[in-house]
Amino acid sequence: MSNISDGTTTTASVRTGSAVTRSGGGLLKVLGMWFGIAAAVGNTIAAGIVRSPGDIAQWLPNIYLFFGVWIVGGLYALVGASSMAELGASIPRSGGQYNFSRRAIGDYAGFIVGWSDWLSTCGTAAAVAIVIAEYSGALFTPLAGHVQSIAVSVIVAFFLLQWRGIKWGSSTQLVTAALKTVAFLVVVVACFVFGGHARDAAPAIAAAAGATPASTPMPILQSGWPLAIAIMLALQAVLYTVDGWDGVVYFGEEVRNPGRDVPRAIFGSVFSIMGIYLLINAAVLYVLPLSQVAGNTFSLGTAAERIFGPYGDTVIRSIMLISLASCMNANQLFCSRTLYAMSCDGLFFRRAAKVNAGGTPAFALFLSTVVAIVFVLFSFERVIAMLSFFFVANYTLSYASLFLLRRKEPAMPRPYRAWGYPYTTGIALAGSILFLIGSIATDRHNAPLALLMLVLSYPIYRTIKFVASSKGAET
């Protein structure tokens, strides 16, 4: 008899002509390492790489500091990847970091992580759908001015695709992630091949347009405490942009060999994402001087215009549509798994734990889709900014969970053990805490609201757990 709340026991289910292994909760174990990397790449490499370089160059107008914060962000992710790989391989459940905090600390800690993760992921899906609609309107004139209706249609389309089953969702993720990676690499190669000529021609182009060097002055690099603040803001932007490298942990129950493939997918994701980001930034700076990147919210598009001429904007927006579609698919997969896991453990209504024949938590996907549509129809920017506080808090709890589980459950099967433990885990935990303190110090509007939301979550947690347990007793 399988134990749903444990999630580690599997049962076999045989279909016509082939054997399909299901997890204890009914999810199909059909995913591998490449899907894990595709989910992380698809979720992470999206609109952030277009905007973040301009903000970072504005704060740190120095080529060494600019690349330095990206490298530091990558090293932070790499150190954290070792710890997350152990947790994901040892607790192979779908649902993300929720599972780690719940097992190590308790139901309430798990609820905080799961609830905030679910809502923020639904909100992210809504935001991505809106950007898809805006880019579509820029590329196709008849679609302009219909942002909300297009965004809702996009969300519903991915809902219908994933409703059919995980094989549809995983195939879509693999294809879109591969396409976006190839497309970005083509742009990178084009920048390095033709960028020198484009950069040499930039002064003539600026003169023809009536611009002068003074029209794009180089920001002044601060020193002392202002420089420390600038570095902190830049690191925040980098860490928010690279967040998502652990995407495979949302599918632990669905990975065929989690002890082997989860660590490989996590490390493969970190190296792939950071490699692509560093290449894109290097390519942009090969074409544009740092002064023209600083404050530019679409520097990749500007570089593409120098390479491809008037078609540059169209090229980048087309690539971004593919990139955002991959991100949209990944977010829909993530949020349904989080709600599914919470329901299995009695922290949400049991109906959301039901899985259809295709391996999709159908009701959890439906509720996630409804919430994403609500975010599209109503203002949600403040909510997302507030919930982003929990992103770092979730990592903090996950790294702390590794320490607790090593002490509480020393006999737990650990197919992969974090290299450098406890030092690497300690560095990741300390970095998360410092980043959390920095977020509170620099965001006086949203961080206090997030803390208030944390306090108010307890009565919500008690109510949901009471209702869910009552429903379970009736059945």
Image: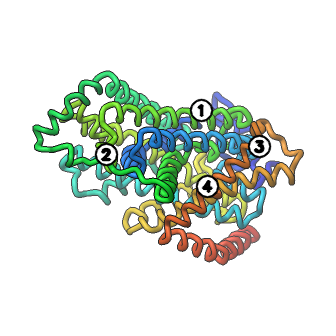
Q: Nearer the viewer, residue 448 or 72?
A: 72
* Label located before the other in sequence (4 or 2): 2
Q: Is residue 430 left or right of residue 148?
A: right
Q: Residue at x 63, y 38 (%)?
A: 266
Q: Residue at x 76, y 36 (%)?
A: 416
Picture coordinates of residue 227 (x, y %)? 47, 54
The amino acid type found where label 3 is placed reads Ser
Marks 1/4: CA distance? 23 Å
* Label located before the other in sequence (3 or 2): 3
Viewer-nearest of labels 1 and 2?
A: 2
Viewer-nearest of labels 3 and 2?
A: 2
Residue with the mark numbered 1:
268
Marks 1/2: CA distance? 28 Å
Location of the C terminus by quadrant is bottom right
Q: Which residue is the extreme one toward the front? A: 224
Residue 20 visible at all: no
* Label located before the other in sequence (4 or 3): 3
Viewer-nearest of labels 1 and 4?
A: 1
Tags 3 and 2 in contact by the CB under 8 Å rule?
Answer: no
Q: Secondary structure at mark 2?
A: loop
Marks 3/2: CA distance? 41 Å
Marks 4/3: CA distance? 18 Å
* Label located before the other in sequence (1 or 4): 1
Q: Nearer the viewer, residue 406 or 325?
A: 406
Picture coordinates of residue 461 (x, y %)? 67, 72
Q: Secondary structure at mark 4?
A: helix
Residue with the mark numbered 2:
298
Residue with the mark numbered 3:
90
Q: Which residue is the extreme one toward the top? A: 193
Picture coordinates of residue 297 (x, y %)? 32, 49
Marks 4/2: CA distance? 33 Å
Q: Residue at x 21, y 47 (%)?
A: 214
